[in-house]
Amino acid sequence: MFTDRRIERHQLPCFLQVFNRLTDRPIGYLGNVSEEGLMLISQLPMMVEVDFELRLKIPGPEGDVHAVDLTATCLWCHEDINPRHYDSGFSVLRAPVEYGQLINALLQYFSFDPLQASA
């Protein structure tokens, strides 16, 4: 089933690890992100139509780690192009202000401004 995406997603060439907030165990890596959702790349398939308590651990400038906790529902899951990996799409239900700040920081970090490149 194909559906048109109306939410702009930003691909992350380097992945950030995602944890189960309740157990603090890693469950996968952030594949892409938007204000409304995210894609998780994992070694195990995720249960669809289930709410997950997720934690993103963001490295700080001085080696410290900032946790961004959110609740998200898994909408779909299918095998990744890489063997023994799965892609899962999540809709974010609850997220702190820091989640939006993370998206903005990633957008700035991974964006390419051709005007600045020619300067």
Image (spheres, rainbow, N blue to C red):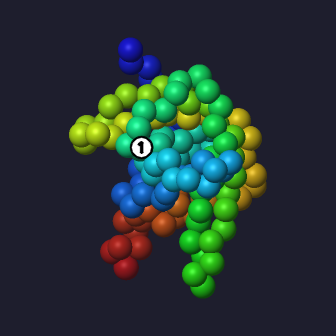
Visible residue check, residue 10: no
Report the quarter where the C terminus lies: bottom left
Residue 50's spot in the image, x, y percent?
Answer: 61, 27
Residue 83 to residue 114: above or below: above
Residue 81's spot in the image, x, y percent?
Answer: 25, 37
Visible residue check, residue 119: yes
* Residue, disc 1: 42
Between residue 66 and residue 22, name the one nearer to us: 22
Extreme bottom residue here? 62
Q: How many numbered markers are drawn?
A: 1
Between residue 100 and residue 87, name the one nearer to us: 87
Report the quarter where the N terminus lies: top left
Say which element carries label 1.
strand
**Amino acid type assigned to the residue bearing label 1 in the image:** Ser
Residue lying at 47% horizontally and 43% vertically, measured from the top left: 40
Q: Is residue 39 left or right of residue 84?
A: right
Q: Residues within 10 Å of mark 1 (few under 14, many from 20)?
A: many
Residue lying at 44% horizontally and 62% vertically, measured from the top left: 110
Extreme top residue here? 1
Quarter residue 68 falls in: bottom right
